[in-house]
Image (cartoon, rainbow, N blue to C red):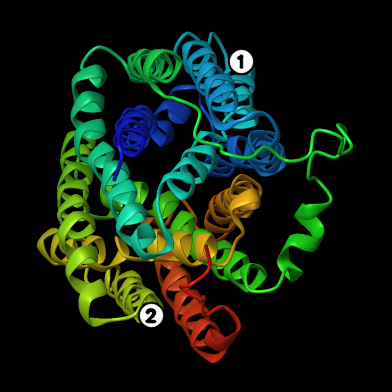
């Protein structure tokens, strides 16, 4: 792994930290603005809907103009959006701030393209494993900073997130070199920004089916994340501080697994088999979580979930990258992130529709739904594995 790899891994860690500071905060912050569960789900969704349309544009532009300038624009949008959210005087400004962060928030797809630029097919799974670990480390440190910030106010968490994103922005400007070796033909239509690919991308050979799998995986995860917080607070009768500490624990386990687990398992199992293993235990965890409303049972299942869930995204990203030409890494990473953003928009809305705040036990329903749907995704992935098995000899 060269210098550029470790720089982008550090930038991704800081960027992940900026994002994960907000995870234990958004649901509660929405309540401060007297938002209902369905309105709060739209607060989650507006960020993801904006990302859905913007990310493929950012990814394709990064193939055309380079990774570095698009990463700078994306991080700057995160800084401004979180500053607005943290000082929002009303719900309208809060919604606009989340939209602004989403419409410029293609930084993960650009960072993934950088990883593909600086790794070989043989080392790509390891590279995405370390990349995933940097995201996981953000899940470790983010909740800690969030917990400290929340002692002042929930809005302060957004301001701290903006400062952290600004650090990633500075690192990108002064330390990250351009990693794109060959730009897309500059004579191509400047107005062709890849929006048409959102429609036909699901039919692309090899990667199209991986986009479908990742979209379904993302939907199940956001069903889980939306229901996770109210279930923990209202059914298990815990407080926001212990919720933040639980996110910290999940993050620690995830980092260990992604740094060591991926490295060990790839010696004995194929990338596809590791993906199947992660999907199976992820599904089992979702179904088991709400069966017994006991805090210790819930913690045990949550740790099992964090162990195996950590394999899923790195393996999908690796498979997409291995089935993509070097010239289209940014485009395909952008499309993948875009479909994932669509899933992030759909999941919270579905979860909000199946729960009833007057009956806290219904907060377990999205977890059951996520578990069953993940089993279906696993079955689909197994049946169609021959369609996306990569050729490791691809350069």
Q: What x and y, as percent, mark residue 198?
A: 76, 53
The answer to whether residue 38 is left or right of residue 152 is right
Residue 227, percent from left and from top = 41, 54
In the rendered structure, the answer to whether residue 359 lies left or right of residue 346 reads left
In the image, residue 247 above or below residue 283: above
Name the residue tied to disc 1.
93
Q: Determine if residue 288 is in view.
A: yes
How packed mark 1 is, by other alpha carbons closer than 10 Å (few <14, some 14-19, many 20 or more), is some
> Looking at the image, do the residues carrying marks 1 and 2 touch, with CB atoms under 8 Å apart?
no
- What mark, if any, has residue 222 been given in the picture? none
Q: Residues within 10 Å of mark 2 (few under 14, many from 20)?
A: some
Q: In percent of the image, x 20 and y 33: which residue is there?
A: 141
Residue at image position (53%, 26%) is: 68
Q: Nearer the viewer, residue 168 or 141?
A: 168
The residue at 47%/11% (across/down) is: 83
Relative to 251, residue 210 above or below: below
Q: Is residue 194 above or below residue 256?
A: above
Q: Secondary structure at mark 1?
A: helix
- Left or right, residue 267 beside residue 287: left
Residue 321 in picture, x, y percent from top left: 52, 59
As helix, strand or loop, the secondary structure at mark 2 comes to helix
* Alpha carbons under labels 1 and 2: distance apart: 42 Å
Q: Splitting the image into 4 quarters, where does residue 24 fall?
A: top left
Q: Name the disc covering residue 276, or none.
A: 2
The reply to whether residue 342 is in sight is no
Residue at image point 48% right, 15% down: 79
Looking at the image, which is closer to me, 321 or 88? 321
Residue 371 point in image, percent of width and height: 41, 74
């Amino acid at each position: 792994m060269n210098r550029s790899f470790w720089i982008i891994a550090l930038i991704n860690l800081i960027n992940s930290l900026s994002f994960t500071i907000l995870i234990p905060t958004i649901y509660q912050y929405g309540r401060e603005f007297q938002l209902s569960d369905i309105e709060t789900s739209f607060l989650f969704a507006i960020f993801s809907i904006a990302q859905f349309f913007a990310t493929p544009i950012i990814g394709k532009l990064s193939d055309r103009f380079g990774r570095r300038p698009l990463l700078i624009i994306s991080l700057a949008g995160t800084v401004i959006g979180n500053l607005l959210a943290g000082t929002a005087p009303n719900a309208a400004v809060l919604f606009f701030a989340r939209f602004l962060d989403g419409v410029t928030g293609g930084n993960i797809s650009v960072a993934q393209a950088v990883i593909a630029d600086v790794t070989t097919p043989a080392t790509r799974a390891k590279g995405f494993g370390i990349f995933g670990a940097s995201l996981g480390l953000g899940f470790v440190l983010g909740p800690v900073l969030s917990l400290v910030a929340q002692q002042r106010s929930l809005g302060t968490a957004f301001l701290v997130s903006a400062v952290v994103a600004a650090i990633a922005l500075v690192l990108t400007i002064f330390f990250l070199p351009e990693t794109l070796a060959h730009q897309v033909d500059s004579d191509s239509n400047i107005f062709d920004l890849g929006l048409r690919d959102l429609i036909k991308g699901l039919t692309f050979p090899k990667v199209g089916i991986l986009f479908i799998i990742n979209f379904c995986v993302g939907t199940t995860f956001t069903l889980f994340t939306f229901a996770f917080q109210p279930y923990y607070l209202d059914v298990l009768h815990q407080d926001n501080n212990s919720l933040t500490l639980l996110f910290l624990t999940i993050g620690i386990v995830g980092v260990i697994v992604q740094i060591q687990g991926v490295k060990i398992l790839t010696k004995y199992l194929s990338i596809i088999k590791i993906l199947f293993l992660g999907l199976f235990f992820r599904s089992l965890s979702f179904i088991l979580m709400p069966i017994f409303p006991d805090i210790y049972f819930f913690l045990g299942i949550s740790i099992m979930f964090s162990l195996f869930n950590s394999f899923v995204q790195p393996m999908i990203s690796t498979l997409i990258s291995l089935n993509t030409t070097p010239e289209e890494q940014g485009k395909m990473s952008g499309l993948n992130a875009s479909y994932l953003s669509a899933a992030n928009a759909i999941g919270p809305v579905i979860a909000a529709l199946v729960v009833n705040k007057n009956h806290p036990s219904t907060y377990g329903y999205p977890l059951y739904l996520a578990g069953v749907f993940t089993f279906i995704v696993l079955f689909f992935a197994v049946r169609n594995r021959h369609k996306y098995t990569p050729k490791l000899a691809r350069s």
